[in-house]
Image: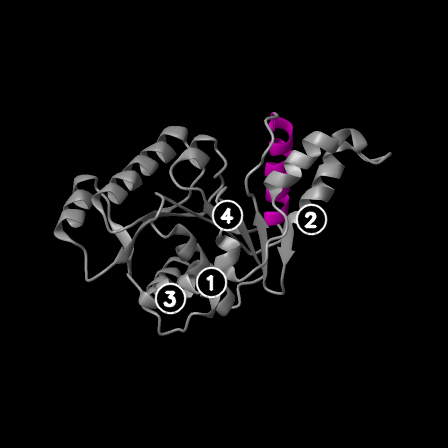
Amino acid sequence: MSFNIAVAGKGGSGKTSVASLVIRYLMKNGAGPILAIDADPNANLGESLGLDIKQTVGLILDDFQRDKIKIPPGMTKEAYLEYKLNQAMVETKALDLLTMGRGEGPDCYCYPNLILRKFADTLAENYPYMVMDNEAGMEHLSRRTTQNVDELFIISDHSVKGVRTVARIRELVAELKLLVKRQSVLINLVPDGLDPLVAEEMKKWGIDAAATIPLDEEVYQYDLKLKPLLDLPDSSKAVRAVNDLMTKLLDGKGVK
């Protein structure tokens, strides 16, 4: 059974970088093959992982809406769409990536999205670990696209606004009764320890951070130069923080 990890948080909090470092940890510790899903319409997880994205689910759904009357004889709509969705997969030896992307058409996607959820669930069964990088804010939660999650990482940058967003996300998870087994709050981009104002806001909302991730010049430089974060050295401050967190959280889950 797949262990599902989802990453959520406000825009600019470094969600994609954290998701990439989580994937780096899993790959370095022999947890593959791993399924990564970029559920952010502003898709950039592929760039952070050093993978070339040629097709997205959003564009495939657009094509399906326009061309569904051209379904080959003998194929059901469901089978045809699943066949097309497989074309969006980027496959490597230890890591496969599915990028949602953004659709361009005005049509209703109710039926295709139903098939997409089923497709993602079926895919996840073939991987020990799935890591989903979600869009900024809370839309994915309100649409219930993040469900059956073993570990939900809620990311805040080092700001009072970020902490308040974390509080709203936690409230929404409870309100919608989403199937999330565990939530862990991560404070990202911390320069030199938590600012007292950020710490005070966390106390106000009853938030305890599972980890603080330092502001890391190496991560910034890798992003600036479009170098895969998977290639960051073990000495990276952010890498060390995420590695320590993952070792603690996944102890006993079979990861070396």
Which x, y percent locates residue 97? 58, 54
Q: CA distance from mark 3 to mark 1?
A: 8 Å
The mark lying in front, picked from 2 and 4, is 4
The mark that comes first in sequence, 1 or 4, is: 4
Residue 33: quadrant of the picture: bottom right
Q: Residues within 10 Å of mark 3 (few under 14, many from 20)?
A: few
The mark that comes first in sequence, 3 or 4, is: 4
Q: What's the amino acid at mark 2? A: Gln
Q: Residues within 10 Å of mark 4 (few under 14, many from 20)?
A: some
Pick the front one: 83 or 176 = 83
Q: What's the amino acid at mark 1? A: Leu
The mark lying in front, picked from 2 and 1, is 1
Q: Secondary structure at mark 3?
A: helix
The mark that comes first in sequence, 2 or 1, is: 2
| Placement of 171 over or under 248, stated as above or below | above
Q: Is residue 115 magenta?
A: yes
Compared across the picture, whether 227 is left or right of 86 comes to left
The residue beneath circle 2 is 87
Pick the front one: 43 or 168 = 43
The residue beneath circle 1 is 226
Which x, y percent locates residue 13? 33, 49
Q: CA distance from mark 1 to mark 4?
A: 14 Å
Q: What's the amino acid at mark 3? A: Gln
At horizontal 45% and vertical 36% (from top left) the residue drawn is 140
Q: Are marks 2 and 4 in contact (CB under 8 Å)?
A: no
Residue at the right extreme? Answer: 73
Circle number at residue 43: 4
At horizontal 48% and vertical 44% (from top left) the residue drawn is 42
